Amino acid sequence: MSVATFRKTGEAVATPVWVTRDGDALYVITGAESGKVKRIRNNPKVEIAACDVRGKTTSATVDATVELLDAAGTAAVEKRVSKKFGLMYKLLKMAEKVRRKQGESIGLRITLDAPNSNSNSNSSSGSGSGSGSGVPSGK
């Protein structure tokens, strides 16, 4: 899934992420000091879309809001992501610890915003592979 956060200038910065779902909420684990988290602290509004592994969107965007989770929430998300993605996630975590000075992570809870006439205005030319429920399919 692609999560687009917004700079103070309003410019979108899209990042492909691994996501899990529980009910109506989507969960992501990311670096606590990442640019994505810094932008979310300034503006919790994001746009999400299905994407391929390289981040090329394959569906229309959907407006959503992100909540940064506390330590307990982050641990739960990390467990959920580890279970879903298995060995690939564990290898990625090891690589991140080598790359980053701090290996701290933070969980994100993403909830879809209520649809309005202005949402989904940034659709990309793709297969439109959304699940029909307003939640993009894919990673």
Image: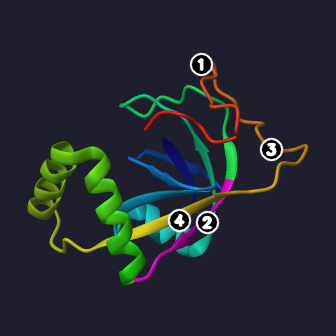
Q: Earlier in the sequence, mark 2 or mark 4?
A: 2
Q: Is residue 32 visible?
A: no
Q: CA distance from mark 2 to mark 1?
A: 28 Å
- Which range is magenta? 64-70
Q: Is residue 100 magenta?
A: no
Give the quarter of the image for residue 74. bottom left
Q: CA distance from mark 1 to mark 3?
A: 17 Å
Q: Earlier in the sequence, mark 3 or mark 4?
A: 4
Q: For mark 4, does the 10 Å Cα neighbourhood hold few (<14), some (14 to 19), or many (20 or more) residues?
A: many
Residue that badge 1 annotates: 126
Q: Is 72 in front, or is 106?
A: 72
The percent coordinates of residue 115 (x first, y second) are 83, 48
Q: CA distance from mark 1 to mark 4?
A: 26 Å
Residue that badge 4 annotates: 109
Q: Residue at x 70, y 38 (%)?
A: 133
- Left or right of residue 91: residue 60: right
Secondary structure under tag 1 reads loop
- The image shows residue 129, relative to residue 2, as above or below, that is above
Circles 2, 1 touching at the beta carbon (< 8 Å) = no
Q: Which mark is residue 8?
A: 2
Secondary structure under tag 3 reads loop
Q: Nearer the viewer, mark 2 or mark 4?
A: 4
The percent coordinates of residue 48 (x first, y second) are 59, 45
Q: For mark 1, does the 10 Å Cα neighbourhood hold few (<14), some (14 to 19), or many (20 or more) residues?
A: few
- The image shows residue 13, relative to residue 139, as above or below, that is below
Q: Amino acid at mark 4?
A: Arg
